């Protein structure tokens, strides 16, 4: 049965363009813009018209994280040709000096065609160490963006005001029911999910904390189960949390196969139909090392994460955060940090290459 599934999948999706695994397009590095200390924290998404959006932190005075840098902006580049060429770097969130925005993540609403780009905000002049949770929205496939919207009160609690909390960078999802769903890290209280049932008009907290969990990604499996794949500091592998009742109750366990050095990763549900039934392939990208940020690799699961393929190396050298999305014609796009955070590159691969023995 497994070989039959593989045959059907390859026949359906091998029409996509093949990419060389050594072919990296540099999208953001400090040589591209004077005065920038570094670019970090990649996020990648495909708009409903097929355009790609690559978002990132533009860290100006230093490469420090949000609590340690008074000038971090959110920058993007767009591609209208499936990643072959990209627009110039454009800053879409830029607060006055002393206020910073960091950790971009994206949800594309497939129904309304709107794009939500989330980030974490801090005013280091007035409330250093206090995180606020924002988004900006695009209604034209990423060409223009709204003013910032603060949803902190909707997805957090008053008693969490001074907690170390932040929306995970990279990507959230839209479930088959239309719900928008994302993860919020609270290092004091545990990871929680938040969502919207009205296409982003309002947001709500799903208050069932998950532990252990740092930066985490959520996917919906073919049977409607929610799966959260989590970074856990010091463990040496990923942790997996699953819920069959939309977050009311959870089961949690480590996945020792998914070796990890405590770093953000990416997971993607690649849906397909066979004999009228929705199936899914899980595609996962992370650093296959217990201790070092190196060896960025991808692997897949045909059984909802019960087992995983051996990893295929994308880049064996120094790497860090990564973000995945499905490209036009079925290939997979990958945007990741490379070479000690000095470069942020885009590449891609076909499903046929990933599934090949």
Image (cartoon, helix red, strand yellow):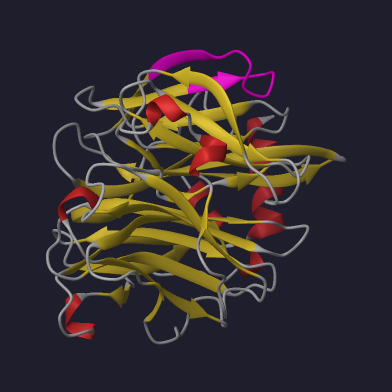
Identify which residue is drawn at 30% across, 76% down.
Answer: 26
Identify which residue is drawn at 35% across, 64% down.
Answer: 56
Left/right placement of residue 133 relative to residue 172 reads left
Q: Is residue 117 above or below residue 275?
A: below
- The front one of 76 and 188 is 188
Residue 214 location (% of width, % of height): 33, 31
Residue 182 location (% of width, % of height): 54, 41
Left/right placement of residue 133 relative to residue 58 reads right
Identify which residue is drawn at 22% across, 47% down.
Answer: 128
Q: Is residue 302 above or below residue 208?
A: below
Q: Is residue 126 above or below residue 148?
A: above
- Magenta part of the chain: 241-254
Marker count (numbered): 0
Residue 311 location (% of width, % of height): 36, 41
- The front one of 350 and 60 is 60
For residue 315, say whether it is visible: yes
Left/right placement of residue 150 relative to residue 310 reads right
For residue 350, say whether it is visible: no
Q: Is residue 45 above or below residue 215?
A: below
Residue 248, magenta (yes or no): yes
Identify which residue is drawn at 60% across, 13% down.
Answer: 249
- The front one of 105 and 199 is 199
């Amino acid at each position: 049965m497994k070989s039959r599934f593989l045959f059907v999948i390859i026949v359906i999706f091998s029409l996509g363009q093949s990419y060389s695994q050594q072919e990296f397009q540099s999208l953001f590095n400090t040589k591209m813009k004077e005065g920038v200390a570094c670019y970090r924290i990649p996020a990648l998404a495909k708009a409903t018209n097929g355009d790609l959006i690559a978002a990132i932190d533009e860290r100006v005075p230093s490469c420090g994280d949000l609590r340690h840098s008074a000038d971090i902006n959110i920058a993007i580049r767009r591609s209208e040709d499936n990643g072959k060429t990209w627009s110039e770097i454009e800053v879409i969130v830029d607060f006055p000096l002393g206020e910073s925005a960091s950790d971009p993540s994206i949800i594309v609403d497939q129904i309304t065609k709107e794009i939500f780009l989330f980030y974490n905000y801090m005013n280091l002049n007035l409330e250093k160490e206090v995180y606020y949770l924002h988004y900006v929205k695009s209604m034209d496939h990423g060409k223009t963006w709204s003013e910032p919207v603060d949803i902190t009160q909707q997805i957090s609690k008053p008693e969490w005001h001074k907690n170390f909390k932040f929306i995970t960078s990279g990507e959230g999802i839209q479930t088959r029911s239309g719900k928008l769903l994302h993860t919020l890290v609270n290092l004091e209280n545990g990871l929680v999910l938040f969502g919207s049932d009205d296409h982003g008009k309002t947001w709500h907290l799903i208050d069932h904390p998950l532990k252990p969990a740092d930066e985490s990604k959520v996917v919906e499996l073919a049977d409607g189960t929610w799966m959260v794949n989590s970074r856990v500091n010091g463990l040496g592998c990923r942790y997996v949390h699953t819920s069959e009742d939309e977050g009311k109750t959870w089961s949690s366990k480590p996945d020792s196969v998914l070796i990890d050095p405590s770093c953000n990763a990416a997971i993607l549900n690649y849906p397909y139909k066979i004999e009228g039934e929705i199936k899914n392939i899980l595609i996962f990208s992370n650093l296959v090392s217990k201790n070092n940020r190196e060896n960025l690799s991808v692997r897949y699961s045909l059984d909802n994460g019960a087992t995983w393929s051996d990893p295929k190396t994308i880049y064996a050298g120094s790497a860090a955060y990564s973000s995945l999305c499905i490209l036009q014609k079925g290939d997979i796009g990958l945007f990741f940090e490379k070479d000690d955070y000095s470069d942020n590159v885009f590449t891609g691969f076909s499903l046929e290459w990933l599934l090949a023995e």
